[in-house]
Image (cartoon, rainbow, N blue to C red):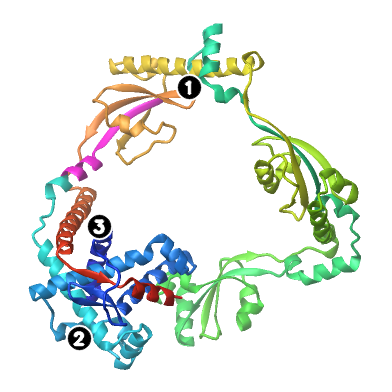
């Protein structure tokens, strides 16, 4: 346990030191043995130490992502340099510990080895043969591993000596916990667009100003004139011949989709012998115990006994009894391969059959579609040859089954060929003068397109968009009028008026915290509530309307509240940890300044080259 604790403590310290960079650490060359990568403060840096640390990081990434990264990816992320920094920093600390005369005895190292679960046999005791085999797989000797444990523990002692005097920030954590757990009682009410019954008539100057201030609303998008020739399975599917035998064969090959036998959702509780199972069933029948309680008595969870949905045949000898019982009942004891068991039926999934006649239309379409895709796939090579020879869209329409068309396409369109993402990507990337290239569509179709011209995005004249400008101005004027009305209501409420007196329907939040949220309110609702004086009201815009918010009362957080005490403890630990890291970083920087570090870059490259 001591070794593992030491590893964890040193590990986060190492991560903190990585950000210090590598300046002054590495110098090329250096005379080192083939098993070492260099020296740190006179101590050798074994190549195997770096290799093991890098492999451990790679395995961690593989577990997180499900894919093992390549060395190129590792180096692109800088992971190899980060790991090298980690092992170098460990040796810096080892050198300082050696200078100070710090170490641990053989007895403590032996206890750590014996206490490691990975080295314990099936009886829970230390297994020396297993210990040697595990080390062999990791590329370690007993001496090197035990020296590593000794170093980890020694570094922990060094860390404890540096950080032993760091006080716990009691006052700071108390202030933060009190701040975050303080509560507000507020009353609020929505103000909708209907609060404004009339709007002023805009002048020409008003409309011109709105038009000038919102050019994006009135700019016509870029339009691309696209000529294309295409063929999709849907276009020719009706021309495909499908025989009754083909439909029958496909139906038979997927019979499980069309003929589904009855299944049941079942739980199975197994007992060690028939006597125990009969006793449990008797208690269950008499009402002395529930099925869930029997599961708990067996030391199990419901998830442990859940078989999911099963068929009659999957239950072997218990199938007839289980499938003869009603949903919600418990049957048994019944024999199973694990022993006598009680079965609870939670639901019945009725048998379902789709006949060949019922399935025929869909199967015919499916087969015809596959044949159409095959025809188009065979056509692709011909289209490639023609386009490579300089054939135009018009040539393709004449010499193949591709059907021609033209579309004025802009971003946001999704009609016709623009329904395909492949078309939209190709249309956006096309350049005038490009030779047509085949584009494969997601449904097995084929398309070739050409950009004929581009109409740039352009601000439309005011007289052309006058109706849209007026609608936009009206919407803006209404929002401003609603907010102005809400502000007037908030001022009245701040002066002592009731929400109801202002024609509002109030809602109350009696215990709002800084981490809270209220549905139907703007994002700054909570922060505004905590900025108000008691009794003060304020209007906030939200969507096409507004809300009026009043602070009713302030409740400070009780110091003895369990939630406050827990947060205070957590904050103190986090803050203390941050202070400790800063102190140790400063200590490490001082060590680095006085430590000679020589790394053989060729040795590092050799290790990297052996990572698979």
Q: Is residue 266 left or right of residue 225?
A: left
Write down the residue under mark 3. 20
| Residue in the image at 63% along x and 78% along y | 314
| Residue in the image at 43% along x and 36% along y | 519
Vertical order, 134 against 17 (above or below): below
x and y, in percent, of residue 580 in the image: 17, 57
| Nearest to N terminus: mark 2 or mark 3 | 3
Label 1–label 2 contact, CB within 8 A: no
x and y, in percent, of residue 377 in the image: 80, 60
- CA neighbours of label 2 inside 10 A, class few (<14), some (14 to 19), many (20+): few
Give 455 or 289, whichever is nearer the viewer: 455
Write down the residue under mark 2. 110
- CA neighbours of label 3 inside 10 A, class few (<14), some (14 to 19), many (20+): few
Q: Is residue 431 left or right of residue 213?
A: right
Would you say residue 230 sits in the magenta stretch? Answer: no
Q: What is the secondary structure assignment of the residue under circle 1?
A: loop
Write down the residue under mark 1. 192
Measure the C-alpha gap from mark 1 to mark 3. Answer: 56 Å
**Residue 229, located in which quarter of the rendered image?**
top right
Q: Tell me the mark number nearer the camera, choosing from 1 and 2.
A: 2
Measure the C-alpha gap from mark 1 to mark 2. Answer: 75 Å
Is residue 410 among what the camera can see?
Answer: yes
Would you say residue 183 sits in the magenta stretch? Answer: yes
**Residue 609, located in which quarter of the rendered image?**
bottom left
Vertical order, 332 against 381 (above or below): below
**Residue 265, located in which quarter of the rendered image?**
bottom right
Measure the C-alpha gap from mark 2 to mark 3. Answer: 35 Å
| Nearest to N terminus: mark 1 or mark 3 | 3
Specify the quadrant that holds the N terminus: bottom left
Which region shows up in magenta?
175-191
Vertical order, 152 against 450 (above or below): below
Is residue 503 among what the camera can see?
Answer: no
């Amino acid at each position: 346990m001591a070794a593992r604790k030491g590893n964890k403590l040193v590990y986060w310290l190492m991560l903190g030191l990585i950000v210090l960079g590598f300046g002054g650490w590495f110098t090329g060359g250096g005379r080192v043995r083939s098993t070492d990568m260099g020296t740190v403060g006179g101590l050798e840096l074994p190549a195997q130490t770096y290799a093991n640390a890098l492999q451990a990081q790679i395995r961690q990434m593989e577990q997180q992502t499900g894919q093992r990264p390549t060395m190129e990816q590792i180096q692109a992320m800088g992971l190899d340099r980060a790991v090298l920094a980690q092992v170098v920093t460990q040796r810096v600390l080892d050198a300082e510990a050696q200078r100070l005369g710090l170490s641990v005895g053989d007895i403590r190292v032996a206890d750590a080895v014996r206490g490691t679960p990975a080295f314990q046999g099936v009886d829970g005791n230390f297994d020396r043969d297993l210990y040697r085999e595990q080390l062999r797989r990791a590329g370690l000797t007993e001496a090197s591993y035990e020296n590593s444990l000794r170093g980890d523990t020694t570094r922990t002692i060094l860390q404890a000596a540096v950080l032993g005097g760091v006080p716990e920030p009691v006052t700071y954590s108390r202030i933060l916990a009190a701040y975050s757990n303080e509560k507000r009682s507020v009353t609020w009410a929505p103000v909708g667009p209907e609060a404004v019954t009339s709007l002023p008539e805009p002048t020409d100057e008003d409309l011109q100003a709105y038009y000038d201030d919102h050019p994006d609303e009135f700019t016509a998008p870029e339009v691309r004139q696209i000529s294309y020739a295409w063929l999709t399975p849907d276009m020719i599917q009706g021309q495909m011949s499908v025989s009754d035998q083909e439909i029958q064969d496909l139906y038979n090959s997927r019979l499980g989709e069309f003929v589904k036998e009855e299944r049941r959702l079942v739980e199975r509780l197994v007992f060690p012998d028939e006597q125990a199972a009969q006793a449990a069933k008797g208690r269950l029948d008499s009402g002395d115990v529930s099925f869930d309680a029997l599961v708990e008595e067996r030391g199990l969870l419901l998830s442990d006994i859940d078989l999911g949905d099963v068929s009659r045949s999957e239950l072997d000898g218990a199938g007839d009894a289980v499938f003869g019982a009603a949903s919600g009942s418990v049957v048994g004891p019944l024999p199973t391969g694990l022993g006598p068991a009680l079965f609870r039926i939670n639901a019945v999934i009725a048998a379902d059959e789709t006949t060949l006649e019922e399935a025929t239309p869909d199967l015919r379409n499916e087969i015809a579609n596959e044949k159409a895709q095959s025809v188009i796939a065979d056509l692709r090579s011909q289209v490639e040859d023609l386009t490579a020879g300089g054939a135009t869209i018009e040539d393709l329409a004449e010499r193949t089954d591709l059907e021609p068309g033209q579309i004025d396409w802009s971003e946001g369109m999704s009609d016709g060929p623009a329904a395909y993402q492949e078309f939209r990507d190709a249309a956006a990337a096309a350049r005038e003068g490009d030779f047509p290239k085949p584009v494969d569509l997601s449904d097995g179709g084929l398309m070739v397109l050409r950009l004929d011209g581009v109409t740039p995005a352009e601000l439309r004249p005011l007289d052309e968009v006058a109706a849209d400008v007026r609608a936009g101005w009206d919407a803006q004027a209404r929002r401003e009028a609603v907010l102005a009305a809400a502000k007037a209501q908030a001022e009245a409420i701040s002066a002592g008026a009731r929400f109801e007196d202002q024609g509002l329907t109030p809602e109350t939040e009696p215990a709002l915290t800084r981490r809270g949220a209220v549905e139907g309110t703007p994002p700054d609702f909570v922060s505004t509530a905590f900025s108000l004086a008691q009794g003060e009201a304020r209007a906030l815009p939200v969507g096409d309307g507004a809300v009026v918010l009043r602070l009713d009362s302030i409740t400070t957080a009780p110091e003895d509240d369990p939630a406050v005490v827990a947060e205070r403890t957590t904050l103190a630990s986090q803050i203390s940890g941050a202070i400790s890291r800063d102190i140790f970083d400063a200590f490490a920087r001082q060590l680095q300044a006085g430590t000679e570090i020589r790394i053989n870059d060729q040795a590092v490259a050799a290790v990297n080259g052996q990572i698979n």
